Amino acid sequence: MSKRGWQEIPIAGIPFLESTEYHTGDWKVFRPVIDEQKCVKCGNCWMFCPDSAIEWDGESVPKPNYKYCKGCGICAEECPAKAIEMVR
Amino acid sequence: MAKEFVPNIRQLPKFMKEDPGILPGHRACAGCGCAIILRQLMMARRKPLVIANATGCMEVVTTIFPYTAWKTPWIHVAFENAAAVAAGIDAGRNKLQRSGRFSDDPDVSVDYDVVALAGDGGTYDIGLQALSGALERWHNFLYILYDNEAYMNTGIQRSGGTPFGAWTTTTPVGSKIKGKPLTKKPIVDIVVAHRIPYAATVSPAYWVDALKKFRKGLETEGPAFIHAFGVCPRGWRTDTKDTIKLSRLAVETCFFPLYEVVNSEWYLTGPSLTIAKNPERKKPVEEYLKLQGRFRHMLLPENKWMLEKFQELVDENWEIILKRAKNV
Ligand SMILES: Cc1ncc(C[n+]2csc(CCOP(=O)(O)OP(=O)(O)O)c2C)c(N)n1
Ligand code: SF4
Ligand code: SF4
Ligand code: SF4
Ligand SMILES: [Mg+2]
């Protein structure tokens, strides 16, 4: 009988694609729109988005990424400048 | 001693863009507070992480075959053994570091932080003995409990972390018994009883406090534990936009006080310390409860006693913590 080692164990479920290939943006009903005039660049929307769907460089006005944004509305709710509107 | 980590909102985006740790495209429900906790953990890294993740929402939503949202070594373990697997990873890391097996291989690094990640079911209930064992064996790892207060992944069943009165599918609201008749297990007390060097509570609404604590947990030599407050719009029957508001109200009402326990000494932090010094700032629990469908029955006039009991439980717990805290 051959000795069985770890090399013989079949590889089971290893997810091999990055989730970025899956676009959760289809889920949304409302999408956040940022008013550049009102935005004070505080970063709240970037910090609290559960889906890393706010793109921000730390300086400019952030930009929602609709490919992933699920439309939860947290960013709009937490914006101190009321610069984000959720639109259908 | 490492230099104190001061999170800077202007620099964090660059750090996260270069090395996100967790990617978008995961399938947590819209507005999931637990997904925010994962991002904040990533923002606090000092080294690469190796994560052992118990079965539960955060495991399922991040790795729906064939996709993964993790940009860091990660393993899905059983429901009950996140701490045991993290302990094994720690032991393996020690052995590799000591033997110097990869010391001249530029492609292999054995310098990383070990994290166990589990929900309330996987911590208060089925994972408790694995956790206790790993703490007793003094493994060098950070255990993160993301507490959404029920078994959410399998359909909102109550756990030892479900609070008094909450509706779940296994604590329904009937004519005699309305929601969970029992109370929330004091999990941090149980963990702290192991006399570990670091334990803390975090709420994602207070992100500076949270990031500092995550970093301290990672830097701790020996076992560290973080109890993170994870709003679950799906199971709590809350509006997705209210996740951070609820994470804030839980602290402002003292339902979920923020503190750290360093070598068995308790210290209130952030807004909880402010409330301790200015008790008039403590909000009534009703403000927290009324936004949540799972507590709806408690606001009916005939169930007033439930609301009062909830407030009493919160007050009792707060008094206990105030007595323990060294900085009030
Ligand atoms: C031994 C065992 N029993 C039951 C299950 C089914 N199960 C998977 S996840 C889960 C609940 C997880 O609850 P929790 O730890 O609170 O995580 P959440 O889903 O709420 O994030 C259960 C019961 C399992 N995987 N293994
Ligand atoms: S609506 Fe929600 S998912 Fe979309 S960008 Fe705002 S916080 Fe992120
Ligand atoms: S939360 Fe509002 S003000 Fe702050 S960066 Fe985002 S859009 Fe601008
Ligand atoms: S059920 Fe709750 S914890 Fe699970 S992914 Fe949905 S919102 Fe998050
Ligand atoms: Mg849970």
Image (tube, grey):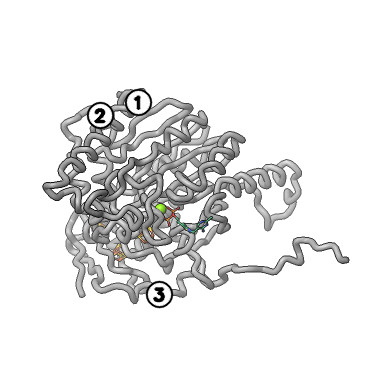
Q: Residue at x 33, y 64 (%)?
A: A54
Quarter of the picture holding the C terminus of chain B = top left
Relative side of A11 to B9, left or right: right
State the image coordinates of residue A12 (x, y, percent, origin top left): 63, 68
Hey, which residue is sitting farthest left in the picture?
A: B301
Q: Is the residue B294 above or below the residue B163 in the image? A: below
Q: Residue at x 42, y 31 (%)?
A: B261
Local SS, label 1: loop
> Residues at marks 3 and 2, common chain?
no
**Which chain is home to disc 2?**
B
> Residues at marks 1 and 2, common chain?
yes
Asked whether disc 1 touches disc 3, contact meaning CB atoms under 8 Å apart, the reply is no
State the image coordinates of residue B260 (x, y, percent, origin top left): 40, 33
Residue bearing the label numbered 1: B325
Q: Is the residue B324 above or below the residue B63 in the image? A: above
Relative side of B325 to B217, left or right: left
Q: Is residue B74 visible?
A: no
**Which chain is home to disc 3?**
A
Q: Is the residue B115 above or below the residue B190 in the image? A: below
Q: Amino acid at mark 2?
A: Ala
Q: CA distance from mark 3 to mark 2?
A: 45 Å
Mark 3 CB within 8 Å of ligand 2: no
Q: Residue at x 33, y 37 (%)?
A: B258
Q: Amino acid at mark 1?
A: Ala
Q: Using the image, tell me which numbered label, if any, was put on residue B276.
A: 2
Asked whether disc 1 touches disc 2, contact meaning CB atoms under 8 Å apart, the reply is yes
Relative side of B225 to A77, left or right: right
